[in-house]
Image (cartoon, rainbow, N blue to C red):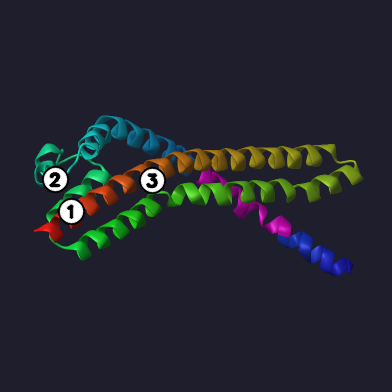
Amino acid sequence: MTYISDVLFWISTGLLVPVVVLLLVLFGRSLLLIGTFFGQYMNMRRVQTAATAELEGLTMANVDTLADRLPHRASSLLLTFVHRMLANAGSSAHISRLLSQYEIAADRDMGISKTLVKLGPVLGLMGTLIPMGPALVGLSTGDIATMAYNMQVAFATTVVGLFSGAVGMITLQVKKRWYMQDITQLEFLAELLNRKNTSV
């Protein structure tokens, strides 16, 4: 039993370095996510607000002129798919496929946020528990310096893991709301285009 316990201790201790490295990678990725998220937010306010206003007032009578009233070079996922749907307005199958492709693209954009939400706290907890073993060993032998160092590592990994998870959670919730609003607009446009096709 002692041998098995020693093996488990060696395995868990050996995982500390990979866990810390992964936490540093997640921390760096979360900082990048904050920057890209801010850029997306500014784009939403500047471009998609105007696009949403056009889509809100859309009817079967003015749907044919929608492409001319929307920006063509804006870096917006919503506008990209609106223009694609208008370009394939005569095909219900293409419109349905574009709606599915939009959902896939939206899910891909939320992928890093989902990863941070799931892995951040998990790696933070692993980084907390792994140094506890050496810290307790140091406490039992009176090596306060070793215990203090391992406790420092444990607390630091907890903070980094929770920070990464928090960034992922906040960005994920906001992006979900954005994409739900967008898919509602796209489904409305698809319905208008399909009705126009059947009425012709």
Residue in the image at 78% along x and 47% along y: 132
- Residue 26 covered by magenta stretch: yes
Which numbered mark, 2 or 3, is in the foreground of this view? 2
Q: Which mark is residue 69?
A: none
Spatial distance from mark 2 to mark 3, Cα to Cα? 22 Å
Spatial distance from mark 1 to mark 3, Cα to Cα? 20 Å
Q: Are marks 2 and 3 in contact (CB under 8 Å)?
A: no
Secondary structure under tag 2 reads helix
For badge 1, the amino acid type reads Leu
User: Circle 1 is placed at which residue position?
Assistant: 193
Secondary structure under tag 3 reads helix
Q: Are marks 1 and 2 in contact (CB under 8 Å)?
A: yes
Secondary structure under tag 1 reads helix
**Residue 197: where, in percent of width, then height?**
13, 59
Residue in the image at 64% along x and 46% along y: 124
104 relative to 48, above or below: below
Residue in the image at 20% along x and 51% along y: 192
Chain-order first, disc 1 or disc 2? 2
Q: Is residue 39 left or right of residue 142?
A: left
Which numbered mark, 1 or 3, is in the foreground of this view? 1
- Mark 3: few/some/many CA within 10 Å (<14, 14-19, 20+): few
- Mark 2: few/some/many CA within 10 Å (<14, 14-19, 20+): some
**Residue 93: where, in percent of width, then height?**
22, 65
Which range is magenta?
12-28
Q: Quadrant of the C terminus?
A: bottom left
User: Circle 2 is placed at which residue position?
Assistant: 63
73 relative to 89, above or below: above
For badge 3, the amino acid type reads Met
